[in-house]
Image (cartoon, grey):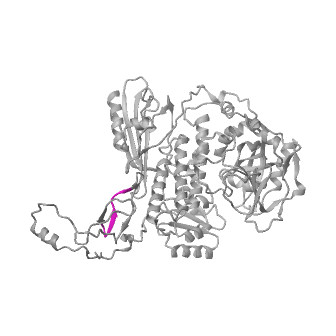
Amino acid sequence: MLFGALGPCPVCNNGLYYYNGQYQCSGNVSEWSKCTYSTTEPVRIKKKWKIPDGTENDYLMKWFKSQKVKKPERVLPPMSPEKSGSKATQRMSLLSPEGLDKLRFSIVGQSKEVVDESIQKLKHAGANFHARVAKDVDCLISCGELDNENAEVRKARRLKIPIVREDYIGECIRKNRTLPFDLYKVENTLESKGGTVTVKVKGRSAVHESSGLQDTAHILEDGKSIYNTTLNMSDLARGVNSYYVLQVIEEDDGSECYVFRKWGRVGNERIGSQKLEEMSKTDAIQEFKRLFLEKTGNPWEAWERKTNFQKQPGRFYPLDIDYGVKQVPKRKDISETKSSLAPQLLELMKMLFNVETYRAAMTEFEINMSEMPLGKLSKENIQKGFEALTEIQNLLKNTADQALAVRESLIVAASNRFFTLIPSIHPHIIRDEDEIMIKAKMLEALQDIEIASKLVGFDSDNDESLDDKYMKLHCNIAPLPHDSEDYKLVERYLLNTHAPTHKDWSLELEEVFSLDRDGELNKYSRYKNNLHNKMLLWHGSRLTNFVGILSQGLRIAPPEAPVTGYMFGKGLYFADLVSKSAQYCYVDRGNPVGLMLLSEVALGDMYELKKATSMDKPPRGKHSTKGLGKTVPLESEFVNWRDDVVVPCGKPVPSSVRSSELLYNEYIVYNTSQVKMQFLLKVRFHHKR
C-alpha cells in the first residue's frame, strides 16, 4: 500500500506478486504456457487507495485521509546474479540467450594444440569442460578425424552420448547458446536411451505392456468408445515434461475389468509409477472418465467426439494415436513361406520393413519411445506439430508487431504446444530457423513412418510375409540386370557426377530397380506430352521415408509446414550431381547403405535464379525453377534416354554463371504430376573418415 497498487502484467494482463526479490506474473500467457514475465520495476497505478465504507480501523482511516497520489519508489535489495529478474525493459530471463554455462563437454583430437585451443574457447564462453567422458556429459567434441579406437570415443558410444564435429564449437560461441546436436553429429547413435513400448493391437487399440495383460486382455470398447488415451504435457516455464497413460482393460473372456494408469517424466523411466485396479465394468468407465476430467480439465466425451475440447492451463493434452484396425491373417510359420520375389527385391523389402531402422530414426529425433508406439502418432497430431512450428517462424519474423516480452512468451507457448503434441526426451524453446528446419524435417519423416505403420504395421504380432507387404506398396519394382543398358547408364551417371566438395564418402552402386507406381504414369503423361525439357534427375531421402515415397510418390511439404529450409519455396527438389542428393540419405558408418531415386522430371521453361528466393510457384509462363550452380555437369557428355529425356551424366566442371550463391544446380517443380519415378538405387557409402 505504501508504494501503490501494482498494474497488470504487460504480457498477459494478469496480476503480479512479489516473490524472491522480484515481481512475477501469476497468470498464463495461453492455455499452453505459464507467463514468465518478471521485473524489479513494476508499473504502479497512480491513484489513491479506496477504503470500504464502514471501516472501523482508525489508523487506516487516518492514513487514507493523508495519503498522496504520488507514492514513494520501492528500492529492492540487490539480488545475486542467479536470482536477478528482468527489468521493465520487458526482457524475460527465461528467453534471453542462456550462454553456454549449462553445456558440459569433453573433447578429443589428434592435435593437442587444437584441442587445448578449443577447450579454452568454450571455457571462456562459460561452458564446463570434463576431462573424461561420464554420464553427466552432454556431448563429446571431435577435433579433426574421429579415432574409433580412442577410449573416450568408445565410452561415449557406450553411454549413448552424442559425438559432434569441431564446427559445433564455433556455432555455439557465435550464437552464445547451446545448440541442438542433430546438425553436427559425426555419427548417429542408433541405440535408444530408453526402452520402447511393444504393441499388440486387438480390435481398435492396444493394451499397454506394463500392465502385464497384453496377451490375455484387450482395451474396453463400447460402441464407438475406446477407453484408452495417452496424455502429454510439456511446460518449459514450469520445468514439466510428463506423460499419463490411462486405459480400461477387459479380460478376453469378459471375466474381469481393470483401470490401468502409468505416469512419469518423458524419457526417464526412473521417474514415475503405475497402478492397476480391478473393478466392475461400470465403475471402471466412471473412474476412467473421472481421471480424464481431472487430468485434462475436459469431459471424456468432448475429446471422444472432437467437439468443445479446450486445452486448459497446467493440464494434460491427449495425443491422437492411430493404432489402425486392419486384421492381419495369421501364419503358423513365416519362415516356411517361400517368397516369389526376386532375391534382390527380397533384400530390398527386408531393408524397407526393418522395424529397427524406424526405431533408430525415432531415437535420433529424440522422440519418446517408452510411451509412444512406433508409427502410431496420427497424421492429425503431426499436422498440429507443423502448425506450431509455422507459428514460431512467424513470431521470429514479425519482430515489429509485438513487444519483445509478448512475442517471446508466445514463442514459449508455441514450443510447449509442439513438444506436448510431439513428445520429446529433451524439449526446449525453439527460437531460430535452424531448429525449425530440423523439427520440420523430423515431422516429414514421422509422416512417412506413420504411412509405413498404417500400410504394413509394426505390431509385435504382425506376421505378414514380405510378399504381402510388397503388394501393399502398389508399385511394381523390378531389379535390372547388371549388364543391361539402363543399369550401365545409371552407374555411369553415379560415378561421373560426384561433386568435388563432397569428400567425406564415395558411392558404390549395388542394385538398380525400375519403378512403376500405380497411376503415376497417367498423371505424368499430360506433362510428358506437353512440356519440353525433360531430365533424369537425382533425389535422396532417408530410408524410413521410402515406404511412403514408393506407395504415395514424392510429396510436397503440406501448407501448414513452415517454409524454413526451402531455398525456392515448397516443392520437389532434384539435382544433377549425385552427391548433392546423396547427402539427404543420412546414412552413417553403422548403416552405410541408402536408397536414392532417379526421376524423369518435366521441367519445361525454367525460372533461373542465382540465390535463394521464397515463392509458392514460379512466375507465369515458367514451369519450374532452376538454381544456377557454380559447378555443373559437362554438357558435351550428356546423353538422351528414351529419345527425349536428357541424362546430365557429365563430369563436374566450373560453370559460366557468375556471382551465384549456389555451389551446384538445383531443380524444383511445384506440381507432383511433373515427376515420374524411374529408378530406385541401392547405394553403399564408403566413409573416408
Q: Quadrant of the C terminus?
A: bottom right
Query: Which quarter of the picture shows residue 35?
Result: bottom left
Who is closer to the viewer here, 277 or 449? 449
Q: Residue at x 64, y 63 (%)?
A: 147
Which residue is at 67% across, 65% downward? 145
Residue closest to the eye, 476 or 687: 476
Determine whether 458 is above or below 252 in the image.
below
Q: Is residue 166 visible?
A: no
Residue 246: horizontal and vertical position, in percent? 40, 39
Q: Is residue 433 above or below residue 78?
A: above
Residue 46 at what x, y percent from top left? 28, 70
Residue 474: within the magenta? no
The secondary structure that most of the magenta stretch takes on is strand
Answer with left or right where residue 17 lies relative to residue 669. left
- Above or below residue 28? Residue 445 is above
- The magenta segment is 19-28
- The location of residue 538, given as percent across then percent down, is 76, 50
The structure residue drawn at horizontal position 60% and vertical position 31%, both measured from the top left corner, is 463
Judge from the rendering whether residue 328 lies leftward or rightward of residue 260; answer left or right. Answer: right
